[in-house]
Amino acid sequence: MSKPHPLDSFEDDIRDHIERETRDNLERGMSPQEARSAALRKFVNVALVMEETRDVWRWLGLEQVLQDLRYGLRFLRRNPRFAAVVVLTMALGIGVNTAV
């Protein structure tokens, strides 16, 4: 049995919040369309909130590491002398570390 994803319950929470706010607005005397619009405005941008929440729950570490690697390789390709110094320094550091 798979564990429910946290975003599934978050989507339910958003829907519940909007429905409750719509009901409150209806009780205040608004028309159904006005009540729903006001509830959505109060909650701001539902799509933006969902996207920001997904970004929090999604693991972006690997994607960011790959992006950094691509940037680093492009930089080293453009500066071959610097690349040689970096490679030699890394090799020397790893070698000394291994020897110790």
Image: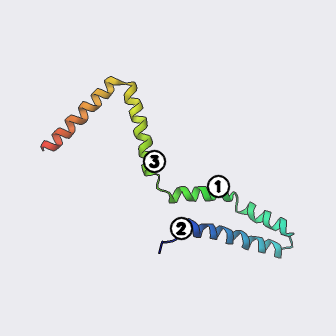
1 or 2: mark nearer the eye: 2
N-terminal label among 1 and 3: 1
**Mark 1 to mark 2: distance in Å?**
17 Å
Classify residue 79 by image quadrant. top left
**Mark 1 to mark 3: distance in Å?**
21 Å
Relative horizontal placement of residue 6, taking residue 84 as reference (left or right): right
Position of the C terminus by quadrant: top left
Classify residue 93 by image quadrant. top left
Q: What residue sits 69% from the left and 57% below the top?
A: 45
Q: Where is mark 3, residue-wise?
A: 63
Helix, strand, or loop for circle 2? helix
**Label 3: few (<14), some (14–19) or many (≥20) C-alpha neighbours in 10 Å:** few
Q: Where is mark 1, residue-wise?
A: 48
Relative horizontal placement of residue 53, taking residue 30 as reference (left or right): left
N-terminal label among 3 and 2: 2
**Label 1: few (<14), some (14–19) or many (≥20) C-alpha neighbours in 10 Å:** few
**Mark 3 to mark 2: distance in Å?**
21 Å
Helix, strand, or loop for circle 3? helix
In this rendered view, identify the residue nearer to me: 28 or 6: 6
Q: What residue sits 42% from the left and 43% below the top?
A: 66
Total tally of numbered discs in the picture: 3
N-terminal label among 1 and 2: 2
Three-letter amino acid code at disc 2?
Answer: Pro
CB contact under 8 Å: marks 1 and 2: no
Q: What residue sits 50% from the left and 57% below the top?
A: 58
Q: What residue sits 62% from the left and 66% below the top?
A: 11
Can you tell which mark lies on residue 10?
Answer: none
Residue 28: x, y in percent? 83, 74
Three-letter amino acid code at disc 3?
Answer: Glu
Relative horizontal placement of residue 24, taking residue 91 as reference (left or right): right
Q: Where is mark 2, residue-wise?
A: 6
On screen, 54 above or below 9?
A: above
